Image: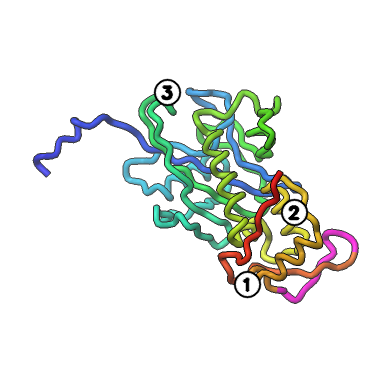
Amino acid sequence: MPTYDPSTFPPFAVTVDLVVLTVRRHALCALVVRRGEEPFQGRWALPGGFVKADEDLGAAAARELSEETGLCALVPPSLSPGAASGAADGNGAHLEQLATYGAPARDPRMRVVSVAHLALAPDLPAPRAGGDANSARWAEVESLLGPADGSGPDADAAPPLAFDHARILADGVERARSKIEYSSLATAFCPAEFTVGELRRVYEAVWGVVLDPRNFHRKVTGTPGFLVPSGGTTTRQGGRPAQLFRAGTATALNPPMLRPEV
């Protein structure tokens, strides 16, 4: 286009950041990396990085996750803005674009707009640091953001997350907490076959509450299409054999599983 002059517009960069959540040892955990470069060298941050000129957003997210943590890519290369309602890969992970963050001063290097992605998956392996990350780990969300009473992060998480990653993480956690009320998303944290007790512990970990086992069992087994008996049992929780279920075909829960007021 001969009349278009790109130099009349200020330059800015695009990054991707990933809120990767899993449940480990009955606690909601997020994947974080320790930055090996400035700015915020030595601080914990969400995995992510700059999008290359010839790279799709989903491909950039997958590449950064692999480079910085060594985990197999959770984000499919074709993830697009139309995936806002969520998608699942072959491993059962839930994937969606979370939000876009573009405050002018969010990155001290230059004007940077970040497209955040949310990934939820069953108990994932320990990450392996690489790229520009010195180390990577799973950290309990409460230690990164502070408990619900707003008392702040603990000493292990200080100083706070780099950039505006605390806000991005908080938005991702709230998205997960809200979506498991009205959708079958909680099963994305479970293996292919699971017990009602294991599913209840997912809700307890994500919401940060303790639920009544009998009421929970009645609600989830009475919600049409939510759970389907697999025909097997397990004793991996100890005690008597517990019935195994798998996720049903329902994507929306009716009635919803409303979280208790704290």
- The structure's colour scheme is rainbow
Q: Is residue 233 magenta?
A: yes
Tell me the kind of residue under disc 2: Arg
Disc 2 target residue: 201
Residue span colored magenta: 229-239
Measure the alpha-carbon separation of dots 1 and 3: 49 Å
Q: Is residue 207 above or below residue 41?
A: below
* The label number, if any, that marks residue 15 in the structure image: none
| First of labels 3, 2 by sequence position | 3
Dot 1: element = loop
Instruction: Nearest to the eye among marks 1 and 3: give it.
Output: 1
Instruction: Say few, some or many: other residues with alpha carbon within 10 Å of mark 3 (under 14 / 14 to 19 / 20 or more).
Output: few
- Quarter where residue 2 is shown: top left
| First of labels 1, 3 by sequence position | 3
Tell me the kind of residue under disc 3: Pro
Q: Residue at x 67, y 69 (%)?
A: 223
Q: Residue at x 39, y 40 (%)?
A: 51
Tell me the kind of residue under disc 1: Gly
Disc 1 target residue: 225
Q: How far across and how far down the image is residue 11, in percent?
A: 28, 31
Q: Quadrant of the C terminus?
A: top right
* The label number, if any, that marks residue 108 in the structure image: 3
Instruction: Nearest to the eye among marks 3 and 2: give it.
Output: 2
Q: Cβ–Cβ below 8 Å for labels 1 and 3?
A: no
- Quarter where residue 143 is shown: top right
